[in-house]
Amino acid sequence: MSVNDAQIIALLQAGKRQGMNALFDRYYKPLVVFADDLLHDLPEAEDTVLEQFVKLWEKELYEHIHPNALSTFLFTIVKNACMNQIAKKGLPTEQLDLPHYAIAQEESYLLDETVIETILAAVRKLPEKTQQVVQSVMCQGHSYQETADELEVSINTVKTLLKAGMRELRSELEEYKKMFLLFMLYPQNFQ
Protein backbone atom coordinates (compact mmCIF):
# COMPACT_ATOMS: atom_id res chain seq x y z
CA MET A 1 0.00 0.00 0.00
CA SER A 2 1.44 3.34 -1.04
CA VAL A 3 1.26 6.09 1.55
CA ASN A 4 1.58 9.74 0.58
CA ASP A 5 3.53 12.40 2.49
CA ALA A 6 0.44 13.82 4.21
CA GLN A 7 -0.45 10.35 5.50
CA ILE A 8 3.13 9.81 6.69
CA ILE A 9 3.06 13.10 8.61
CA ALA A 10 -0.36 12.25 10.10
CA LEU A 11 0.89 8.83 11.26
CA LEU A 12 4.01 10.39 12.78
CA GLN A 13 1.99 13.07 14.56
CA ALA A 14 -0.29 10.37 15.94
CA GLY A 15 2.83 8.75 17.41
CA LYS A 16 2.45 5.62 15.34
CA ARG A 17 5.48 3.62 14.29
CA GLN A 18 3.76 2.92 10.96
CA GLY A 19 4.66 6.51 10.11
CA MET A 20 8.36 5.75 10.49
CA ASN A 21 7.97 2.52 8.54
CA ALA A 22 6.22 4.36 5.70
CA LEU A 23 8.82 7.14 5.81
CA PHE A 24 11.60 4.56 5.63
CA ASP A 25 9.98 2.64 2.77
CA ARG A 26 9.40 5.77 0.72
CA TYR A 27 12.58 7.77 1.36
CA TYR A 28 15.43 5.60 2.66
CA LYS A 29 16.89 4.43 -0.66
CA PRO A 30 16.70 7.77 -2.50
CA LEU A 31 18.22 9.54 0.53
CA VAL A 32 21.05 7.01 0.78
CA VAL A 33 21.85 7.41 -2.91
CA PHE A 34 21.73 11.19 -2.49
CA ALA A 35 24.02 11.06 0.57
CA ASP A 36 26.39 8.62 -1.14
CA ASP A 37 26.68 11.01 -4.06
CA LEU A 38 27.91 13.66 -1.62
CA LEU A 39 30.03 11.49 0.69
CA HIS A 40 31.27 8.82 -1.75
CA ASP A 41 30.99 6.32 1.09
CA LEU A 42 27.92 4.05 1.08
CA PRO A 43 28.12 2.85 4.72
CA GLU A 44 28.59 6.45 5.90
CA ALA A 45 25.67 7.54 3.70
CA GLU A 46 23.44 4.83 5.20
CA ASP A 47 24.44 5.83 8.74
CA THR A 48 23.80 9.51 7.99
CA VAL A 49 20.29 8.85 6.68
CA LEU A 50 19.43 6.61 9.63
CA GLU A 51 20.74 9.24 12.06
CA GLN A 52 18.46 11.85 10.48
CA PHE A 53 15.46 9.50 10.71
CA VAL A 54 16.21 8.92 14.42
CA LYS A 55 16.56 12.67 14.98
CA LEU A 56 13.27 13.27 13.18
CA TRP A 57 11.51 10.77 15.46
CA GLU A 58 13.20 11.53 18.78
CA LYS A 59 13.03 15.32 18.48
CA GLU A 60 9.53 15.15 16.93
CA LEU A 61 10.68 17.34 14.05
CA TYR A 62 7.73 16.06 12.00
CA GLU A 63 5.47 18.29 14.12
CA HIS A 64 6.75 21.31 12.20
CA ILE A 65 6.82 19.92 8.66
CA HIS A 66 4.12 20.83 6.17
CA PRO A 67 3.07 17.66 4.31
CA ASN A 68 3.95 19.27 0.96
CA ALA A 69 7.47 19.96 2.21
CA LEU A 70 8.39 16.52 3.60
CA SER A 71 10.68 15.45 0.76
CA THR A 72 12.40 18.84 0.61
CA PHE A 73 12.87 18.78 4.39
CA LEU A 74 14.37 15.27 4.33
CA PHE A 75 16.76 15.95 1.48
CA THR A 76 17.81 19.22 3.10
CA ILE A 77 18.61 17.70 6.51
CA VAL A 78 20.52 14.86 4.87
CA LYS A 79 22.41 17.32 2.67
CA ASN A 80 23.29 19.46 5.71
CA ALA A 81 24.45 16.41 7.69
CA CYS A 82 26.64 15.33 4.77
CA MET A 83 28.09 18.81 4.37
CA ASN A 84 28.91 18.86 8.10
CA GLN A 85 30.70 15.53 7.80
CA ILE A 86 32.67 16.73 4.78
CA ALA A 87 33.64 19.92 6.65
CA LYS A 88 34.73 17.90 9.74
CA LYS A 89 37.12 15.97 7.50
CA GLY A 90 38.68 19.27 6.49
CA LEU A 91 37.58 18.88 2.90
CA PRO A 92 36.30 21.87 0.95
CA THR A 93 32.56 22.11 0.72
CA GLU A 94 30.70 23.70 -2.10
CA GLN A 95 27.14 24.90 -2.11
CA LEU A 96 25.06 22.27 -3.85
CA ASP A 97 21.70 22.99 -5.39
CA LEU A 98 19.00 20.69 -4.11
CA PRO A 99 17.03 19.40 -7.10
CA HIS A 100 13.40 20.40 -7.19
CA TYR A 101 11.75 17.12 -6.25
CA ALA A 102 8.17 18.28 -6.82
CA ILE A 103 8.97 18.70 -10.52
CA ALA A 104 10.72 15.34 -10.55
CA GLN A 105 7.68 13.67 -9.00
CA GLU A 106 5.31 15.25 -11.48
CA GLU A 107 7.51 14.31 -14.40
CA SER A 108 7.92 10.75 -13.15
CA TYR A 109 4.28 10.16 -14.00
CA LEU A 110 4.81 11.51 -17.49
CA LEU A 111 7.69 9.26 -18.46
CA ASP A 112 7.33 8.04 -21.98
CA GLU A 113 8.53 4.70 -23.27
CA THR A 114 11.69 6.24 -24.78
CA VAL A 115 12.87 7.51 -21.41
CA ILE A 116 12.10 4.22 -19.70
CA GLU A 117 13.89 2.28 -22.44
CA THR A 118 16.97 4.54 -22.20
CA ILE A 119 17.30 3.81 -18.49
CA LEU A 120 16.56 0.10 -18.87
CA ALA A 121 19.17 -0.11 -21.65
CA ALA A 122 21.73 1.45 -19.28
CA VAL A 123 20.78 -1.07 -16.58
CA ARG A 124 21.14 -3.94 -19.08
CA LYS A 125 24.71 -2.81 -19.87
CA LEU A 126 25.75 -3.51 -16.27
CA PRO A 127 27.56 -6.76 -15.47
CA GLU A 128 25.05 -9.54 -14.78
CA LYS A 129 25.36 -9.70 -10.96
CA THR A 130 25.42 -5.90 -10.67
CA GLN A 131 22.34 -5.71 -12.87
CA GLN A 132 20.55 -8.26 -10.69
CA VAL A 133 21.40 -6.30 -7.52
CA VAL A 134 20.27 -2.96 -8.99
CA GLN A 135 17.01 -4.47 -10.21
CA SER A 136 16.35 -6.29 -6.94
CA VAL A 137 17.09 -3.39 -4.60
CA MET A 138 16.06 -0.39 -6.69
CA CYS A 139 13.28 -1.67 -8.94
CA GLN A 140 11.74 -4.43 -6.86
CA GLY A 141 12.25 -2.76 -3.48
CA HIS A 142 13.96 -5.74 -1.86
CA SER A 143 16.14 -5.17 1.19
CA TYR A 144 19.88 -5.80 1.04
CA GLN A 145 19.34 -9.01 3.03
CA GLU A 146 16.56 -10.25 0.74
CA THR A 147 18.75 -9.52 -2.28
CA ALA A 148 21.75 -11.26 -0.71
CA ASP A 149 19.64 -14.32 0.08
CA GLU A 150 18.08 -14.37 -3.38
CA LEU A 151 21.44 -14.08 -5.16
CA GLU A 152 23.29 -16.22 -2.61
CA VAL A 153 25.92 -13.56 -1.87
CA SER A 154 26.84 -11.56 1.24
CA ILE A 155 25.20 -8.27 2.20
CA ASN A 156 28.57 -6.57 1.68
CA THR A 157 28.64 -7.91 -1.88
CA VAL A 158 25.16 -6.49 -2.45
CA LYS A 159 26.26 -3.08 -1.12
CA THR A 160 29.43 -3.11 -3.21
CA LEU A 161 27.62 -4.14 -6.39
CA LEU A 162 24.83 -1.62 -5.82
CA LYS A 163 27.32 1.18 -5.29
CA ALA A 164 29.28 0.18 -8.41
CA GLY A 165 26.08 -0.17 -10.43
CA MET A 166 24.76 3.22 -9.37
CA ARG A 167 28.12 4.80 -10.18
CA GLU A 168 28.08 3.22 -13.65
CA LEU A 169 24.48 4.31 -14.23
CA ARG A 170 25.31 7.88 -13.14
CA SER A 171 28.17 7.87 -15.63
CA GLU A 172 26.14 6.22 -18.42
CA LEU A 173 23.22 8.58 -17.91
CA GLU A 174 25.33 11.70 -17.27
CA GLU A 175 23.66 13.64 -20.04
CA TYR A 176 20.29 12.49 -18.69
CA LYS A 177 20.71 13.65 -15.08
CA LYS A 178 17.02 14.38 -14.70
CA MET A 179 16.12 10.86 -15.85
CA PHE A 180 18.65 9.36 -13.44
CA LEU A 181 17.09 11.36 -10.61
CA LEU A 182 13.66 10.03 -11.58
CA PHE A 183 15.04 6.50 -11.58
CA MET A 184 16.41 7.06 -8.07
CA LEU A 185 13.19 8.52 -6.72
CA TYR A 186 10.66 6.33 -8.53
CA PRO A 187 12.41 3.11 -9.58
CA GLN A 188 9.08 1.22 -9.68
CA ASN A 189 8.36 3.08 -12.94
CA PHE A 190 11.29 1.23 -14.54
CA GLN A 191 10.31 -2.37 -13.90
Image (tube, grey):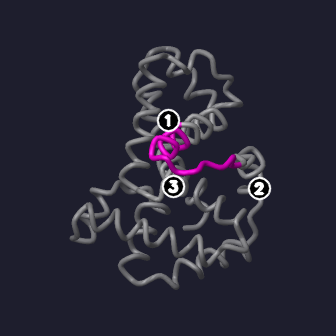
Q: Residue at x 66, y 59 (%)?
A: 182
Q: Secondary structure at mark 3?
A: helix
User: Which residue is denoted by mark 2 in the rendering?
Assistant: 107
Q: Secondary structure at mark 2?
A: helix
Q: CA distance from mark 3 to mark 1?
A: 16 Å
Question: What segment is highlighted magenta in the picture?
Answer: 81-96
Q: Which amino acid lies under the numbered mark 2 shown in the image of this protein?
A: Glu
The disc at residue 174 is: none
Give coordinates of residue 70: x percent, y percent.
63, 32
117 relative to 21, above or below? below
Give coordinates of residue 50: x percent, y percent.
40, 38
Q: Nearer the viewer, residue 24 or 156?
A: 156
Q: Residues within 10 Å of mark 3 (few under 14, many from 20)?
A: many
Tell which circle, 2 or 1, labels the residue nearer the N-terminal end.
Answer: 1
Decide if residue 52 is on the left or right side of residue 186: left
Task: Find the residue positioned furthest to the front.
Answer: 90
User: Which residue is denoted by mark 1 in the rendering?
Assistant: 23
